[in-house]
Amino acid sequence: MTAPKGVTRRRFVQASVALAGMAAASKLHSAQEPAGEGLFDVHLHLSQAWYGADHGPIDARQLLAWMDAHDVAHAAVLPLVSPEAFWYPVTTEFVLSETRAHRDRLFPFCAVDPRTLATHLPQRKDVVDLLKRYQDAGAVGFGEHKPNLPIDDPLNMRLYEACSDVGLPLLFHLDNLANVDEPGLPGLARALAAFPDLTFIGHGKGWWASISGGLTKADLHVGYPRGAVISGGAVDQLMDRYPNIYGDLSSSGAHALTRAPAFGRDFIRRRADRLLFGTDYYDLTQQAFPQFSLFDELEVDPDVRRKIGGANARRLLG
């Protein structure tokens, strides 16, 4: 094949390979779509032009094409506003604008860096008013929340309070660089107890490492821990104690449940009402998404697939 005029051969080859992969993925994954309204990916991202030709941009049209190729019916689209979160800010305004014409399938989240509450949003009413404006513009959740602060930092806690007031579920990333906590996740426990009406959705290396007990501080920043899962993990303990904590299976989530398949099989069944399907797609070069084979690998029954694949997200996000 010859590259179209104005398109470099390298870019043309990349696009051709990606489309071929999407077609193959569509055939592979079509049998995995749970019954009902189809997969709901709770964790996708858009990116702007300056991300670089090899990685992006990813606009709404491209995101929908990727979703179609992977049999994803609906998706939450998450901004990234904290300086630690991405190579550059992906603003709430950009996400709201890009998704506006596709709200039948793309559901925007909003985000505010909590450090703004120390400067430009000093009062509770200021934060609530901003979140309500985002909500009125279509936002159905808050996140990806990813600041380099303790997860129970006073600024974070003020932000959680506003999200609870407005009724926006909050999806957070937790590791040793974002929403920092200690082994056992005591800071997260304090946040969950303080805001019982706020739905928290856990994501990231530190969150998913915490399915296991016996962790050190360094373990909260290991991308894909291997080996047996030791009893006493914080994730199970928190889910037992707090009905407002959920888990996002994107990124390290699928790896966490397949590191010890017997544990993963039991966990995904026990926590079927509290887990959400997601991939964390944000880059054109991404190829592997183990979330699509997770249900088959762990021999998950149809009712659990339905809940995790979409029903839970639709219930939480309306």
Image (cartoon, grey):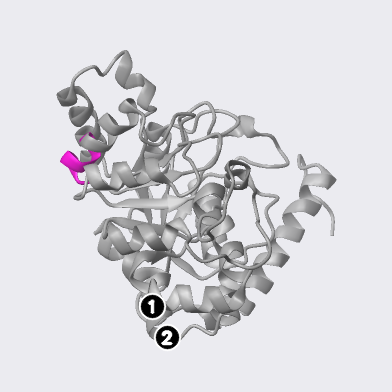
Image coordinates for residue 126, horizontal then vertical, percent: 19, 22
The residue carrying pointer 2 sits among few (fewer than 14), some (14 to 19) or many (20 or more) residues within 10 Å by Cα, namely some
Q: Secondary structure at mark 1?
A: helix
User: In this rendering, is residue 149 above or below 259?
Assistant: above
User: In this rendering, is residue 214 above or below 24?
Assistant: above
Bounds of the magenta segment: 162-167
Measure how far apart labels 1 and 2 are at the Cα level: 6 Å
> Is residue 197 part of the magenta span, yes or no?
no
Q: Determine which of the numbered discs, if any, sits on residue 302 in the image.
A: 2
Work out whether residue 105 can be spotted: no
Image position of 106 (left or right of 292): left
Tell me the amino acid under the disc marked 1: Arg
In front here: 181 or 119?
181
- For the N terminus, the quadrant is bottom right
Image coordinates for residue 30, horizontal then vertical, percent: 55, 79
> Is residue 163 part of the magenta span, yes or no?
yes
The residue carrying pointer 1 sits among few (fewer than 14), some (14 to 19) or many (20 or more) residues within 10 Å by Cα, namely many
Q: Which residue is mark 1?
A: 306
Image position of 93 (left or right of 283): left
Give the main secondary structure of the magenta stretch.
Answer: helix
Image position of 298 (left or right of 132): right
